[in-house]
């Protein structure tokens, strides 16, 4: 029933927010109010589903933009994590989601970046679009495994997001999500009430690494450090 209540809440609140949020954004040219409302809707829906969370490490962050990189084990991850990112963030999002009425328009207004992982050239173009967003001072949040882990173990990290970091020289903040894979496992549709843990690790400066592979290894090690040993996967 909690999962159904969450879906009903989102179905009602999203179009109602669009009714005032879109005109306000068009009139003012400022997406801040619409973004904050969307984040409140996302996180309140997660709370209605019975999910509670513990956040650690945000005191390690300064007043600047970052590229946040997190493991990905559940469909709960985006609506839980993204509202917890300090300040406004962009996200690399599957291009198919931009076709959804209202949602797609809202994501474009918030400068979210569509990505087509089935097309290498299109994926590279998406990274370039993301670079522009980061250079404008926004955060970028990425799930560098590329897809949800089927068993909760940390998978190999794809290189695309690391090109973004090395090209812009913006620090990476590794994030570990723990527990969401138990609350909403891959392939399941019903959320189990429970608690998740969100760990923000110290920022990693890409300029401190001799090559991209070393940077990837450092980020992977940081993410894995807060996971149970059996879920850290193989390098």
Image (cartoon, rainbow, N blue to C red):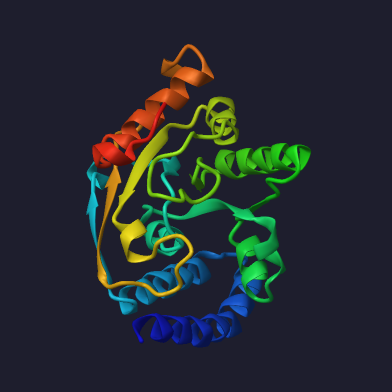
Q: Residue 156 vs residue 176: left or right?
A: right
Left or right of 84 in this view: 94: right
Residue nearest the viewer, comparing 153 with 140: 153
Quadrant in which the N terminus appears: bottom left
Which quadrant would residue 176 be assigned to in this image?
A: top left
**What residue lies at 66% left-to-right and 61% top-to-bottom?**
108
Identify whether 129 is placed above or below 11: above
Q: Which of 177 and 135 is in front in this view?
A: 177
Q: Where is residue 158 in the image (x, y as percent from the top left)?
A: 55, 34
Measured along the vertical axis of the image, is residue 196 above or below residue 155?
Answer: below
Q: Looking at the figure, which quarter contains the C terminus?
A: top left
- Residue at image position (70%, 41%) is 123
Between 32 and 92, which is closer to the camera in this rendering? Answer: 92
The quarter holding residue 195 reads bottom left
Q: Can residue 61 be seen in this view?
A: no
Classify residue 14 as left or right of residue 171. Answer: right
Q: Where is residue 206 in the image (x, y as percent from the top left)?
A: 46, 23
- Total marks shown come to 0
Residue 13 at least partly seen: yes
Residue appearing at x 45%, y 23% in the figure: 215
User: What's the residue at 69%, 62% (across, down)?
Assistant: 96
Q: In this view, does 175 lie above or below 32?
A: above
* Residue, far top: 210
Return the x and y of residue 24 as percentages of the image width and height. 59, 76
């Amino acid at each position: 029933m909690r999962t159904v209540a969450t879906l009903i809440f989102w179905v009602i609140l999203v179009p109602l927010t669009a009714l005032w949020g879109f005109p306000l954004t068009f009139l003012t040219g400022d997406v801040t109010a619409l973004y904050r409302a969307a984040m409140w809707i996302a996180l309140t829906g997660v709370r209605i589903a019975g999910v509670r969370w513990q956040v650690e490490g945000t005191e390690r962050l300064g007043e600047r933009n970052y590229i946040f990189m997190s493991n990905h084990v559940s469909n709960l991850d985006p609506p839980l994590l993204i509202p917890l990112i300090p300040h406004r963030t962009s996200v690399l999002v599957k291009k198919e989601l931009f076709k959804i009425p209202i949602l797609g328009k809202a994501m474009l207004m918030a400068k979210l970046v569509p990505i087509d992982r089935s097309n290498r050239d299109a994926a590279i173009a998406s990274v370039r679009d993301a670079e522009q967003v980061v250079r404008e001072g926004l955060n970028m949040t990425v799930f560098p495994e590329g897809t949800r882990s089927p068993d909760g173990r940390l998978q190999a990290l794809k290189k695309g997001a690391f090109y973004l970091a090395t090209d812009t020289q913006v620090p990476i903040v590794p994030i570990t999500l723990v527990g969401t894979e138990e609350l909403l496992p891959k392939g399941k549709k019903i959320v189990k009430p429970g608690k998740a843990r969100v760990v923000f690790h110290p920022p990693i400066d890409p300029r401190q690494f001799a090559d991209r592979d070393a940077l990837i290894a450092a980020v992977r090690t940081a993410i894995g450090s807060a996971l149970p040993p059996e879920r850290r996967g193989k390098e």
